[in-house]
Image (cartoon, rainbow, N blue to C red):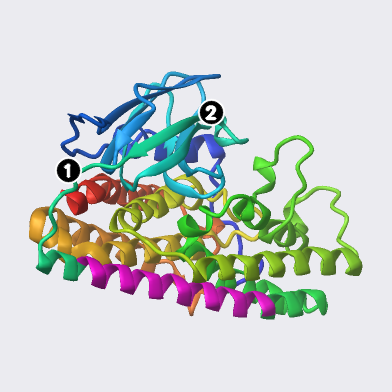
C-alpha cells in the first residue's frame, strides 16, 4: 500500500453520483415473488415513505414469506426496516430507496411482535410503528433434499461470519497497539487490512443497534451533537493531509478512541457468537453488501482520508459472493439461469477489481481514472439486477 500516491485524476462528488445513480441500482432493483392475502393478513404490504410519515397498508401479516413494496414519495433517499420488538435488532432492511422509486424487501418472518421504521434522509431513529406477525398454517413445504441444502448454507455462513468477527477482533487489537504506541506507519498499513474483516460482514454488524455508528460512522454523516468515534475518527488522525487546520489527537485522546473501538469490536464479536441466520437473511445480506459498494466504495466516499476504498470494495464483494455461494445450490435447483448469471457477473466484477491490485493490497482510490470508476460502477450495477432477485428465488 502506498501512503501518499500521486493523484492522477480526482473525481468530484457530482460526477461520482452521476456515474452510480443514473444506473438502475437504486431506482429499479426489484424482486418478484408471489405474495397474496390469507385469513391472517396480507403477504404483500405497501409501504409509503414520505418526508415525515411512514404508512403501511397493513400492520399485521401471517408468518412465512412477506413482501414489503417500499415507495419513496419524499425528496430524500430513504430506508425501511423491520425491527425486533425491542426496536434495536434489525430483522430485515432495504436501504437507498431514491425519491419516487419503489423497491421490494422479501423476507421470512416468524410469529411475534415487531417494529417498522422508515428513515427519510437515512438518519436518526426513523418514523416507527408496530407490526404483528401471526401464526400461519401456510408455511411452504420444504423437501428433505432442500432442507439439507438449507442447513448446509446456514452452517457455512454462520461459520464464515464468526471467523471474520474473530479475525476482526485480532486485527483490531494489533491496530490499537500500533496506534496507541505512536507507530503511525504500522497503523496506516494495518488499517485497511483490519477493516477488511468488518466490511465482509458489514450488514450483519449493522443489525446490532448502535454498534455500527459507534464503530463505522463517517464524519459527513454526523448528526448535530453526535459524538464521532470509531474507525473513521482514527483514520482522520492518521491521514490528516486533506483536513484544513487539523489538530492531531493527544496520546490520551488516542488511547480513549482506540480502546473504545476495541471494546465495541469485542462486544460485536460476543453478539455474533450467539447469532443464528435464515436463508433469506443470507440472501438479503448479499444484496445489502453490494449496495454498500455502490453507495460508498465505488464513489470513494467511505475512506475519505486514507483513500483505501478499494480494500473495502473488495471486502464487500467477498461477503456478497460468499453469501450467494452458500445459497447457490438452492437457487440452482429453482432458477438455474439466475444462478449462472450471478456466477458470471461476480467473476466479471472481480476481474475489474484485480486490475487495480498493488502487491497484497490495492492502489489508492485517487489513482483511478474516471473511466475506470465508471467501469466498476457499471459492473456493480450489472450484478445488482440479478442479485436483487436472489431472496425471492431462495424462498420460492
Q: Quick check: is 151 in the magenta stretch?
A: yes
Residue, disc 2 = 120
Res. 126 image quadrant: top right
Q: Is residue 366 left or right of residue 332?
A: right
Q: Nearer the viewer, mark 2 or mark 1?
A: 1
Q: Position of residue 388 (x, y in %)?
A: 27, 45
Please give the count of numbered marks on the rendered protein. 2
Secondary element at image label 2: helix
- Whether tag 2 and tag 1 are in contact, CB under 8 A, the answer is no
- Residue in the foreground of this view, choosing between 347 and 38: 38
- Residue in the foreground of this view, choosing between 393 and 141: 141
Q: Position of residue 223 (x, y in %)?
A: 71, 37
Residue stretch in magenta: 150-173
> Which numbered marker is on residue 138?
1
Q: Kindly report the secondary structure that dominates the magenta region of the rendered protein.
A: helix
Observer able to see residue 189 = yes
Q: Residue at x 33, y 67 (%)?
A: 322
Q: Residue at x 28, y 39 (%)?
A: 66
Amino acid at each position: 500500500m502506498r501512503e501518499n500516491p500521486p493523484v492522477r485524476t480526482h473525481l468530484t462528488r457530482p460526477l461520482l453520483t452521476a456515474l452510480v445513480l443514473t444506473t438502475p441500482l437504486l431506482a429499479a432493483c426489484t424482486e418478484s415473488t408471489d405474495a397474496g392475502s390469507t385469513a391472517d393478513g396480507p403477504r404483500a404490504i405497501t409501504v409509503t415513505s414520505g418526508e415525515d410519515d411512514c404508512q403501511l397498508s397493513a400492520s399485521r401479516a401471517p408468518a412465512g414469506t412477506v413482501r414489503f413494496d417500499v415507495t419513496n414519495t419524499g425528496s430524500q433517499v430513504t430506508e425501511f426496516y423491520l425491527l425486533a420488538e425491542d426496536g434495536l435488532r434489525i430483522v430485515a432492511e432495504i436501504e437507498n430507496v431514491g425519491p419516487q422509486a419503489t423497491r421490494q424487501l422479501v423476507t421470512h418472518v416468524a410469529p411475534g411482535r415487531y417494529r417498522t421504521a422508515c428513515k427519510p434522509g437515512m438518519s436518526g431513529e426513523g418514523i416507527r410503528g408496530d407490526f404483528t406477525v401471526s401464526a400461519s398454517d401456510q408455511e411452504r413445504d420444504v423437501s428433505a433434499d432442500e432442507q439439507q441444502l438449507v442447513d448446509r448454507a446456514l452452517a457455512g455462513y454462520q461459520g464464515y461470519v464468526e471467523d471474520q468477527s474473530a479475525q476482526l477482533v485480532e486485527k483490531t487489537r494489533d491496530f490499537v497497539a500500533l496506534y496507541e504506541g505512536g507507530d503511525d506507519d504500522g497503523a496506516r498499513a494495518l488499517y485497511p487490512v483490519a477493516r477488511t474483516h468488518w466490511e465482509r460482514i458489514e450488514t450483519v454488524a449493522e443489525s446490532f443497534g448502535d454498534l455500527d455508528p459507534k464503530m463505522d460512522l463517517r464524519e459527513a454523516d454526523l448528526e448535530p451533537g453526535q459524538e464521532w468515534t470509531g474507525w473513521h475518527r482514527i483514520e482522520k488522525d492518521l491521514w490528516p493531509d486533506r483536513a484544513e487546520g487539523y489538530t492531531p489527537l493527544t496520546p490520551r485522546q488516542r488511547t480513549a478512541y482506540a480502546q473504545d473501538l476495541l471494546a465495541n469490536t469485542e462486544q460485536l464479536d460476543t453478539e455474533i457468537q450467539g447469532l443464528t441466520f435464515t436463508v433469506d437473511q443470507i440472501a438479503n445480506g448479499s444484496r445489502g453488501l453490494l449496495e454498500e459498494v455502490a453507495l460508498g466504495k465505488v464513489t470513494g466516499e467511505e475512506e475519505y482520508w486514507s483513500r483505501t476504498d478499494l480494500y473495502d470494495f473488495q471486502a464487500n464483494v467477498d461477503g456478497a459472493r460468499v453469501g450467494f455461494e452458500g445459497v447457490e445450490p438452492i437457487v440452482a435447483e429453482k432458477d438455474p439461469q439466475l444462478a449462472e448469471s450471478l456466477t458470471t457477473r461476480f467473476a466479471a466484477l472481480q476481474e475489474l477489481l484485480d486490475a487495480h491490485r498493488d502487491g497484497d493490497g490495492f492502489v489508492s482510490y485517487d489513482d483511478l481514472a474516471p473511466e475506470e470508476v465508471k467501469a466498476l460502477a457499471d459492473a456493480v450495477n450489472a450484478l445488482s439486477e440479478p442479485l436483487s432477485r436472489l431472496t425471492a428465488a431462495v424462498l420460492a
